[in-house]
Image (tube, helix red, strand yellow):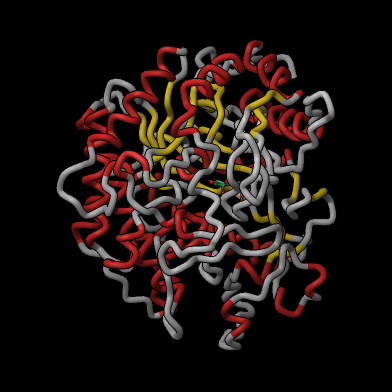
Amino acid sequence: MTLRKDFLWGGAVAAHQLEGGWKAGGKGVSVADVMTAGANGVERRITDGVLPGENYPNHEAIDFYHRYKDDVKLFAELGVNCFRTSIAWTRIFPNGDEQEPNEEGLQFYDDLFDECLKNGIEPVITLSHFEMPYHLVTAYGGWRNRQLIDFFVRFAEVVMTRYKDKVKYWMTFNEINNQANFDMDFAPFTNSGLKFVEGENREKIMYQAAHYELVASARVVELGHKINPEFQIGCMIAMCPIYPATCKPEDMMAAQIAMQRRLWFTDVHARGHYPSYILKYFERKGFDLDITEEDIKNLAKGEVDYIGFSYYMSFAIKDQAEKIDPSLKLNYMPSTAEKSEKQENLGAPTFDYIENRDLVKNQYVQVSEWGWQIDPLGLRYSLNWFNERYEKPLFIVENGFGAVDKVEEDGSIHDPYRVEYLKAHIEAMKEAVNYDGVDLIGYTPWGFIDLVSAGTGEMKKRYGFIYVDKDNEGNGTLERSKKDSFAWYSKVIASNGEEL
Ligand code: BG6
């Protein structure tokens, strides 16, 4: 029993987390450029523009912008046949609303993709990965504004046309469903450039922004297929399956509704229309969203070709979680709703879900140092969930273990914990293919070269097979070296997943 012969084995990154060169080649300021470094359990701050004296870790990141040629050589040595990265929108349209693209930015990705292809590595491209132009936030209010659809479609048209013979696999919006956690500031800002003012209905605005993104995605899928009918254009979903904490029927029901609230985005991407459960929810909440007849037509014409998703962990939920002892909660931080004491009583029969309030610890799994629950079987479960529901090819475009690595005196780095995590997940993925019949395109573990953490802005939360000498404060030589896991992953790729 094997994975398909043309299985894509790669590694995944995002432009803002590794490129650096935040002003190089005419690049504009992105939302990632105004986020300070946080820490484990401490949210990153979003500043009003780039302020003096702040530490913005994405400005330099790991300086891939200037070092990509050597890095691509290392990727080739690792043996990957694909490389998932994103195109920084701000390199192509620095402010996002220009008519003409920035040639220097386009040339950078031409050179990068040529370097990859020369080394037998196929680029897999995300169009928007937490890095929209900051100008679109300040001048338009981010994706709450319908005009963003046209700006994004223009950006996509330019890059898809330019790279039509270099890139086949595309994804539109990275982890579009993170913003289901609308109570915290991070996800709405990184997904959609949303900043809220006191008293605004965050949830409604999030749904509106997500709607515009889904329309933009659908238009790009349709357009992309015209640019090159060979294109495979997918969505990108953060999959954290939500289990009921017990078999109590109310917990089961709460889990089902929670899955709907986190994953309805996939329904629209993959089926081309809104599921009835979310329309009913809008009706009950009185959300009179701007959804036109033309939008509905566009959604129907823009079903994705495949479902790309990230998988790091699973969640668990208990009904009525607000009554639960906070010590049983997962990664608990008081939400805006709680802080402002405006929270409704959301008990049965609605089973409404507030992400930051309702998740509980799963007693059956271990957690990483950052509180992420480690659950390899959850990956098989997730693959089955997507497969049953959509019957489309699947692509695991992120998976990995963020951990602190220690460099030994002789420079070696022993990271058996990373190998253990990835091995268990690859095993689960193979079982989903071999026993459950899932159609799987590929596997690209996250941050295969160390980079800046999206959630915390740290360097010390490392995922890579390739170590980068840089610490949280920005000190270090930026030199690259191989961890023990490098040889392990090479062997996995060379054996098409047979030797783990
Ligand atoms: C996903 C994102 O959420 O998880 C990546 O697509 C991110 O951008 C990755 O880096 C891991 O999260 P973190 O917070 O550990 O960097």
Return the x and y of residue 383 as percentages of the image width and height: 59, 38
- Image spot of residue 492 (x, y percent): 68, 17
For residue 67, above or below residue 275: above
Query: What residue occupies the far bottom of the structure in this picture?
Result: 341
What residue appears at the point 15 percent right and 48 percent down from the top-left corner? 99
In this picture, is 48 found above or below 414? below
| Left or right relative to 84: residue 241 | right
Residue at 39% across / 75% down in the picture?
283
Where is residue 229 shown, x and y percent of the image? 25, 26
Q: Is residue 430 left or right of residue 413?
A: left
Q: Position of residue 63 (x, y in %)?
A: 50, 36
Point out the image quarter for the N terminus: top right
Residue at point 43% right, 75% down?
A: 196
Towards the viewer: 376 or 372: 372
Residue 363 sits in which quadrant?
bottom right
Count of numbered tags: 0
Q: Is residue 19 visible?
A: yes
Residue at the (31%, 71%) spot, across then down: 289
The quadrant of the image that shows the C terminus is top right
Of residues 146 and 163, the one nearer the viewer is: 163
Residue 300 visible somewhere in the drawing: no
